[in-house]
Amino acid sequence: MTASAQQNGYTVAILGATGLVGSHLIQILEERQFPVKKLKPLASKRTAGSLINFMGQDITVEEATPDAFEGVDIVLASAGGSVSQELVPEAVKRGCVVIDNTSCFRLTEGVPLVVAGVNDADIQHHKGIIANPNCSTAQLMPVFKALDDAFGLERVIVSTYQSVSGAGKEGMDELMETTGTVYRLMGGPETGHRDEAKAPENRVFARPIAFNLVAQIDQFVEGGVEDGYTKEETKVIHESRKILHRPDLKVTATAIRVPVLIGHSESATLEFKKPVSPQEAMDILEKTPDVVVARNPKDFPTPVEATGKDPVYVGRIRRDTSNPEHGLNMWIVADNLRIGAALNAVRLAEVLVKNNWLKQGSARQEPAQV
Ligand SMILES: NC(=O)c1ccc[n+]([C@@H]2O[C@H](COP(=O)([O-])OP(=O)(O)OC[C@H]3O[C@@H](n4cnc5c(N)ncnc54)[C@H](OP(=O)(O)O)[C@@H]3O)[C@@H](O)[C@H]2O)c1
């Protein structure tokens, strides 16, 4: 990174600029006034040539090819795992630092997996790639980290209620397109009858999503102790351990897709080494940056209220009646497109720039000193 790049801003490529996460990345770069000298929106052949607006200027989307990364300082990647697999190494070869939103490199040895404000220091060891966690993992981390530091987290049981935007533009479209049809097919509230023959096809989700719950996100794992889990569930397990530096942490998860447009909600049961009361946990979480606590159970957060907002919202903090001295239940809600993806990616870019950890070469070969 040259001194002039630091003074004049950075050339930032958005890989997947026309997608849901990509459009949020562009919006958040603007909102947070990230020092962008030049923005390079990249997408597939299908949308190359279309225009996106950044800081009042229309910019042409280019096709993502290896050479498109020439001269780029930072790549924010959200074009899917197979695209990252192919193009992220090409970007790194050309001197870029990539913050990748896909699952491609999250568990790769030597790739930091980071939630801003939770394990920022891990970034300094990057070798060109920094991974953003899965959206359902990301929003849990500020809460778990604060409570782990205070009371020693021993075991976590999570059930997720994940919005359709977690499956991208097509997921939102499928919910919107099928909801009215399904309502009419059911004959309105009077009959509740469903004419399966006329039901709209589900392309994105494993079952119809309108007025339904789908107990499958991503593919099923076959074999081993995780046999029967979905990959989404195993992401929560393995990514939490990596981010919290707790390879021993007992974690299990059930991931459910719900007919909500934006915002993931999660029910978590936590078991601690030290005794803990709901009040003590709330006191800790109230002092935790990026976390908003509802002390009154009636003020529980909802995904609609969390949409477009930056914090992680926590409510319904109460004793686990099956483990009242050492266990708590809670309800954790956040905007998956922001905390779970775009906001975290931009905050990681800010950490890189602020600490001068972007430096190409030095950051790759030997970790910077802090
Ligand atoms: N949605 C979330 O809450 C969330 C959270 C964390 C991580 N992620 C991850 O972020 C990634 C994108 O998610 P999304 O929700 O933004 O999906 P999306 O709305 O479907 O957008 C996908 C983007 O990828 C681009 N793309 C697809 N194939 C491409 C190719 N061959 N070459 C270049 N660009 C290509 C698309 O461009 P075209 O418009 O040209 O097709 C589009 O810009 C996924 O890996 C997802 O797992 C998503």
Image: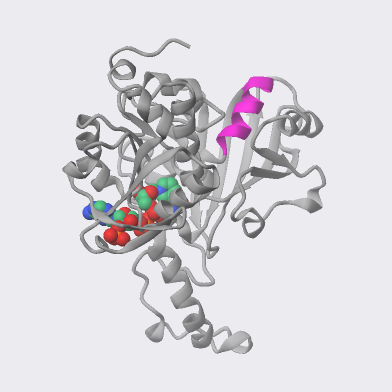
The picture places residue 66, in percent across and down from the top left corner, at 17, 42
Can see residue 81?
A: yes
Q: Magenta stretch containing residue 103, yes or no?
A: no
Image height check: is 227 above or below 95? Answer: below
Residue at the (62%, 85%) spot, across then down: 189
Stretch of the chain drawn in magenta: 140-152
Can see residue 229?
A: no
Residue at the (67%, 57%) spot, across then down: 305
- Would residue 248 be found to the left or right of residue 222 on screen? right
- How many labels sit on residues? 0
Which residue is at the front of the view, 250 or 3? 3
Image height check: is 154 above or below 342? Answer: above
Q: Splitting the image into 4 quarters, where does residue 150 fall?
A: top right
- Would residue 41 be found to the left or right of residue 134 on screen? left
Which residue is at the front of the view, 309 or 3? 3
Residue at the (82%, 46%) spot, across then down: 296
Which residue is at the front of the view, 160 or 341? 341
Which residue is at the front of the view, 165 or 213? 165
Residue at the (51%, 39%) spot, across then down: 138
